[in-house]
Amino acid sequence: MPVTLYDTLSRSVQPLQPVDGTVLRFYCCGPTVYGPAHIGNFRTFLIQDTLRRVLELNGIFVKHVRNITDLDDKTIRLSEETGISLQEFTARWTDKFHADCAALNLLPPASEPSAIGHIPQQIALIEKLINKNHAYATEDGSVYFRVNSFEDYGRLSRLKDRELKSQNENSAGEVNDADEYDRESIRDFALWKSRKPEDGNNYWSSPWGDGRPGWHLECSAMVESAFGGETIDLHGGGIDLCFPHHENEIAQSECAHGKDFCRHWFHSAHLMVEGAKMSKSLGNLYTLDELHQKGFNSMAVRYTLISGSYRQQLNFTFDGLHAAQSALTRLERFAESLLIKINERPEAFNERYVRPDAPEDFGRFTKAWDALRNNLNTPASLGAIFGVIGSNPAASVDAEEAEYLLRAFGCLLYAFGLELFTAPKKLSQAPARIQALADARWEAKQAKDWGQADQLRDSLLAEGWIVKDSKDGYELEAAE
Ligand code: AMP
Ligand code: ZN
């Protein structure tokens, strides 16, 4: 059975197969690194990661590339405001992103190209587009893509069905902060932006003068460089990126290379807070650190963000996070009931059973596995898992059957990217607020975010608590 997925371009669920028969080329628009990613961003990255795991378990070799957007209006503005060089500023936030990814158990992509690392490739792409008459330079030294020159423009977002007035509103209905320049048509978008005083030292020389590439162009250039200009199989991003970002990527890449850019488009719906999209600009966001500090562990966050259908908006609530914690405890009790049958300790579970090798037959878990392969139906899969758990198979199986169930169950947990028994053991009776800080420090340590771990250790000390680590947990002692 192939893995199927909804494709925004054809508006239908389609099987996912690599076009070259060997490697599935999967590109995801990555984070803009000017602050910590919020859990809405992570919803999208976690959904992409879960799909990749399902594909790999189903025997498909995936080349997963996720870029780092380190060059745009926001990274430049904020690095200028903080007086740190753009490279140093974005490197700092890239490190933080990586630490959060590790805590959330995201698999590292095959490569993580950055926009700043691809300036010559972007200039070459613009030259190609100008030579083919798909782009033009303006008097101020900017370059625009000529939207009228690409007949297929709007196919992904079905723009021809409604009037395209400008580039300034995205597919989630939000206003973009697109710069106003001297364009031939309001539909045209910038490939190269001439240097402005507010750019500070962040400009590069080009045949059109000093400036910097436009955001949409960056992804086209990085896709070209990662996949050698070949058609890619799958492209992912949040639904807000469908228009204009992905529409513009298609236009640039297809006009430059004269072949299809991407076969299958994968858009995930937003994480919401009280009816509004979680976003930096609305200020209604939560970061992973904030949730750690409130005492939630990363696996509960991961569970919450991937348990709903990826095509439906998910409303973020603390009740949801508490429910995720209880669900994880139920999964742990189930694993324990089987581990007892084979005289194994819980600690061995992640290493021995949560592994990327699928059993030939998922047995009682077949429904759960099929649901994942069928358009990444995570809620149906979790429902099927809890159905099996509810039937209490541990009561009647022998050691061999217990081992088999553990293998299938562990493989499903691998697909979800969930590890059990990761919450630290609490060995002291400190107040809840202190305990939450210590849990957050433990999480940071697990994610090898040493800076954050040290900072939290200092905060605990300032509150009068000394934290002492042991192999699988920590102890809190009141300072003298
Ligand atoms: P950004 O860091 O803004 O470039 O966004 C990184 C990724 O997160 C993109 O794929 C966005 O579409 C996605 N994204 C942004 N906000 C949300 C949200 N509230 N829920 C889900 N995905 C989001
Ligand atoms: Zn992109």
Image (spheres, helix red, strand yellow):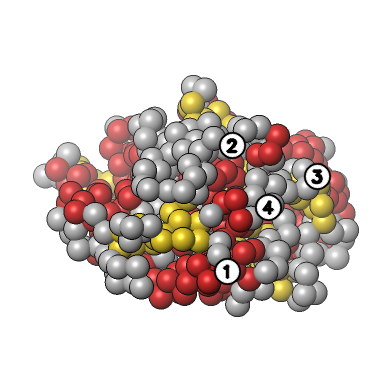
Residue at the image position 53 percent from the left and 71 percent from the top: 131
**Mark 1 to mark 3: distance in Å?**
33 Å
- Given the image, on which type of amino acid does mark 4 rest? Glu
Q: Secondary structure at mark 4?
A: loop
Residue 441 picture location, percent across and down: 32, 50
- Given the image, on which type of amino acid does mark 2 rest? Leu
Name the one closer to the observer, 395 or 378.
378
Q: Residues within 10 Å of mark 1 (few under 14, many from 20)?
A: few
Circles 4 and 3, Cβ within 8 Å, touching? The answer is no
Q: Which residue is mark 2?
A: 164
Circles 2 and 3, Cβ within 8 Å, touching? The answer is no
- Given the image, on which type of amino acid does mark 1 rest? Lys
Q: Earlier in the sequence, mark 4 or mark 3?
A: 3
Q: Which residue is mark 3?
A: 12
Figure check: 52 above or below 21: above
Ligand 2: does it lie within 8 Å of the C-beta at label 1?
A: no
Judged by depth in the image, the label closer to the viewer, 2 or 1, is 1
Q: Which residue is mark 4?
A: 151
Circles 4 and 2, Cβ within 8 Å, touching? The answer is no
